[in-house]
Amino acid sequence: MSNVTAQSLPINNSENAGSAETTPGHSVEIRWEIVARTAGLMPATILAGRLKAENIPVRAWQEGAGQALGLTVGLLGAGYVAVPEEYAKLAHKILEDENQAWEEEE
């Protein structure tokens, strides 16, 4: 979907593990990729919980103005789910499988 760069977070990255292990407080810049867009914050939070259950670092949010006004439609009402880009393929697969399971139940 789209990429978002956030502040550095203290997540161990296997590529940078050598320097992270020897430097206390070392942080690595994480590039976040949006893997889902929902109608409001609640569905985004549910999807984020599903990904978190699979041990995927995840963030869910809604634009501040939309959240303050209680919007669930339009650009300000959209909820977003983002994961670090190295987890994006796995997250898409999990969400796709989840969607197929829901469709089969209907």
Image: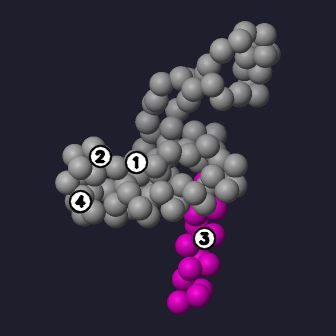
Report the residue at 67% width, 56% height from top: 53
Label 3: element kind: helix
Going by the numbered disc 1, the residue's amino acid type is: Trp
- Whether pointer 4 and pointer 1 mark residues with C-beta atoms closer than 8 Å, the reply is no
Dominant SS in magenta: helix
Q: Which residues are magenta?
A: 91-106
Residue, disc 3: 98
- Mark 2 or 3: in front is 2
Q: Are marks 3 and 1 in contact (CB under 8 Å)?
A: no
Residue at the spot of label 1? 61
Q: Which residue is mark 2?
A: 63
Residue 99 magenta: yes
Residue 82 coordinates in the image, percent (x, y): 49, 46
Instruction: Write down the quadrant of residue 50 in the picture.
Output: bottom right
Mark 1 or mark 4, which is nearer the start of the sequence? 1
The mark that comes first in sequence, 4 or 2, is 2
Q: Earlier in the sequence, mark 4 or mark 3?
A: 4
